[in-house]
Image (spheres, coloured by chain):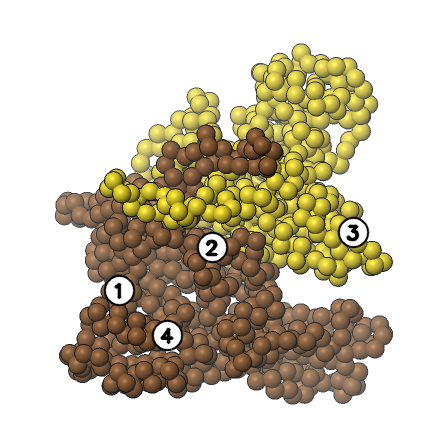
Chain colours: A yellow, B brown
Amino acid sequence: MGKNLTSRSEDYSRWYNELVVKADLAENSGVRGCMVIKPYGFAIWEKMQAQLDKMFKETGHENAYFPLFIPKSYLSKEASHVEGFAKECAVVTHYRLKNAEDGSGIVVDEEAKLEEELIVRPTSETIIWDTYRRWIQSYRDLPIMVNQWANVVRWEMRTRLFLRTAEFLWQEGHTAHATRQEAMDEAEQMMHVYADFAESYMGVPVIKGTKTESERFAGAEETFCIEALMQDGKALQAGTSHFLGQNFAKAFDVKFATKEGKQDFVWATSWGVSTRLMGALIMTHSDDNGLVLPPKLAPIQVVIVPIYKGMEQLDAIAERVEPLIKSLREKGISVKFDKRDTHKPGFKFNEYELKGVPVRLAVGQRDLESGTFEVARRDTLEKESVKAEEIVDRITALLEDIQKNIYQKALDFRSDHITKVDTYEEFKNVLEEKGGFISAHWDGTNETEERIKNETKATIRCIPFPPEKEEGSCMVTGNPSVQRVLFAKAY
Amino acid sequence: MGKNLTSRSEDYSRWYNELVVKADLAENSGVRGCMVIKPYGFAIWEKMQAQLDKMFKETGHENAYFPLFIPKSYLSKEASHVEGFAKECAVVTHYRLKNAEDGSGIVVDEEAKLEEELIVRPTSETIIWDTYRRWIQSYRDLPIMVNQWANVVRWEMRTRLFLRTAEFLWQEGHTAHATRQEAMDEAEQMMHVYADFAESYMGVPVIKGTKTESERFAGAEETFCIEALMQDGKALQAGTSHFLGQNFAKAFDVKFATKEGKQDFVWATSWGVSTRLMGALIMTHSDDNGLVLPPKLAPIQVVIVPIYKGMEQLDAIAERVEPLIKSLREKGISVKFDKRDTHKPGFKFNEYELKGVPVRLAVGQRDLESGTFEVARRDTLEKESVKAEEIVDRITALLEDIQKNIYQKALDFRSDHITKVDTYEEFKNVLEEKGGFISAHWDGTNETEERIKNETKATIRCIPFPPEKEEGSCMVTGNPSVQRVLFAKAY
């Protein structure tokens, strides 16, 4: 198996598209913009889900499930929300097919038109707050700390595997609180949970911040976010957490009796990460040889490739590695022993490099004789020979080291790609020649933000959080500014 | 909290509907036929998912994800499949909303009509076999052993929480094989996996069997099933596994090169269980006091209710139970200590009975003095006083005993409700007076099956598997029969 992978320097975008398909992560389906997540890609997503779910439960959340469909009228109850989503909604208008009378196949049955059209959820605030109205009467019913794992649909015109697809998988937390402060704390907390997950598990360093008004979620009063940087110098929004104020409670009339016996609207948050994280994971670490996976999320952490001639040698190798496989599995390390006789070792080496397996062991006749294993690490491609009696400890240490190393590498790259600028000229030069995050003063107006976006395609990725105050003047208008914000071109 | 639960003898159907809502399992949503699965209900479903997923992986399956939408043209490629599903399909015809010009709100944008309408998947054979065509070239690519956890939509006219909803959650396995025998073995294997899960985890005894031609899945050549019996004497199909022959491979042109170098169509299976299992779980064990949950699937296995006056007594109780909670959790037992001061012990007792928590501990001042706990088991409602030093062992034993006991109780009920009959007269009497499964001879024709269904509303639930041969004659036509089949009225 030759990898035939376009190199990053040649064409970064093509490298990504090829890699996703060749590493068996996902592919396009027969439905425009909808992807098939293949077993190997899904196994990574499952690991991400399991860890995130654990972190949500540790912070007091429970899972639930709400309908896929949203009555059209619900969507329009929150004005800015409908404005944000109406253009990309998939609309269900009928519920029955029938055979076309002209024999041309099956058609929609016009008699089976729905009384009210249904939207396939692009996000679930409206259907959930319609439900919360029934769940909440008193302060005793609060807080509600609910999350759901679900598929959502946003009819995007230009799609890319994992990064932007018409249907994607995500989780959406929806919490309800008695006070503004509690809701704000929750929204901030979930940003920290996401950042911790991105850094400690995905090995992806992120910058925490808040969004400017124009980049906020449709219906939010504050959006917290985490922003990652890809190897091509473009930013990728990896997760958002919204303080929704009382907007949805007002739209859906969700009031509660306070401890003092008054009626008040409920305070809300929502927060989500999606299969887009797969894109961030792939683009942060991978190289021209293929995927590089953090050991904590790799479906296969160690692969053992036997190098043999004839069944007798294979049997001898199998016997040798059996106790090793057992020891590793007892330590919770996932191991695959690839004894397929349909493929040569070189083919397998390529395949596991392409698939980003963190540690590869090769065992041949000479290793059997000398009591050693050839060990290769995926991140640096370094090889070493390790004695059998030290191999379990060495693998354990290597997995930890790879996890740290790829994070550090990504962090170093990002540190090299945050540039402070004070003039618009400099801003444009850095954006053009180097990319990455640009830290600059901005006067806080939509107009200036819009102008910069139109002229350079860079957007304000976030206002770093917690705020770092610094007096300055806007690089474009010269008007006063109290802190720098981060610009970048973004996915 | 008074339970105010209708009794089973009064109105079984109403008892079920009330129980589902009052025990916080699920409720109807603002979208016709679509339910909201509430956190407590979802926690049970999560436990079911986790165990099933483990069993699927142990039998060699991997998870993947396929699109929610299916192009209309795909559905019609397999003739009997489209016939089975076309009448209950939700159809997406548009992808954009816009403001109505008359100011009446938002409407579907007629300019944003899809070129080809999309079906919201009622099941995924068609989109998956369209994908498998790209994955399968040679016998080396087989078998494909894939499962997906997903939501599906079938636009049913009459819906009931968990039992029949327009949208439901399920898993659907879709496997591809090189030989007929291998596919048939897989389909049979998954029936056994489902039966094992139902009996060992849900505590629901099931009968394994195959479906008659008229009851088969649309597109299948053989359907294996597991059938459970509810307390009202009606049967409930709890899981199905289909041998699809080469039907979908032919419809989607999925061929492979055999070892011998010939081209052949691929053999298929599909198999699924859904949130309907929640209905089976609820109806099998629960009583007039509420839910009865098998310990293996109970989100809370043990609840501790303090009985106290004033904070001092509560603190003393909390101190006493703390090491107990720790010991139980170390054994993997989930415990809730309910120290809410907003509700009285009697209210809490009612609540946990209603929610089916298997074991309840009560601790008051007198227990503190005597070093005991009052222990109540949910299945029999029996109480006992247990010494502190024996409590952990006792709880462990109780949980095991409850799991066994509720299964045995359900099994005894079913044994009492399988009646052998030899005449149609007797058949109708038993069906009317006792219900349950009726074992009778049938001549194997669709006509007789249809007649019995029309005249009595009973259907053939299954032909028991493995077959038990017995010469006889059809109770209706007198024509020869080689084995008895099981009839019942069913959900």
* Label drawn at residue B165: none
- Which residue type does callout 3 highlight? Asp
Which chain is mark 4 on? B
- In 3D space, how far apart are the residues under numbered discs 3 and 4 (Cα atoms)? 51 Å
Residue at mark 1 shares a chain with residue at mark 3 = no
Residue tagged by mark 4? Answer: B489
Q: Secondary structure at mark 2?
A: strand
Q: What whole-number distance in Å separates the C-alpha atoms at marks 1 and 3?
A: 57 Å
Q: Residues within 10 Å of mark 3 (few under 14, many from 20)?
A: some
* Amino acid type, residue under disc 2 in the picture: Glu
Mark 1 and mark 2: Cα distance apart in space: 24 Å
What residue does disc 1 label?
B214
Q: CA distance from mark 2 to mark 3?
A: 34 Å
Work out how far the residue at label 1 is from the one at label 4, CA to CA, in angstroms. 16 Å
Asked if disc 1 and disc 4 are in contact, CB closer than 8 Å, the reply is: no
Q: Position of residue A264 (x, y in %)?
A: 78, 51
Q: Is residue A211 above or below residue A297?
A: above
Q: Is residue A360 left or right of residue B474?
A: right
Q: Amino acid at mark 1?
A: Ser
Give me the chain letter of mark 1.
Answer: B
**Residue A264 has which mark?**
3
Within 10 angstroms of label 1, few (less than 14), some, or many (20 or more) residues?
few
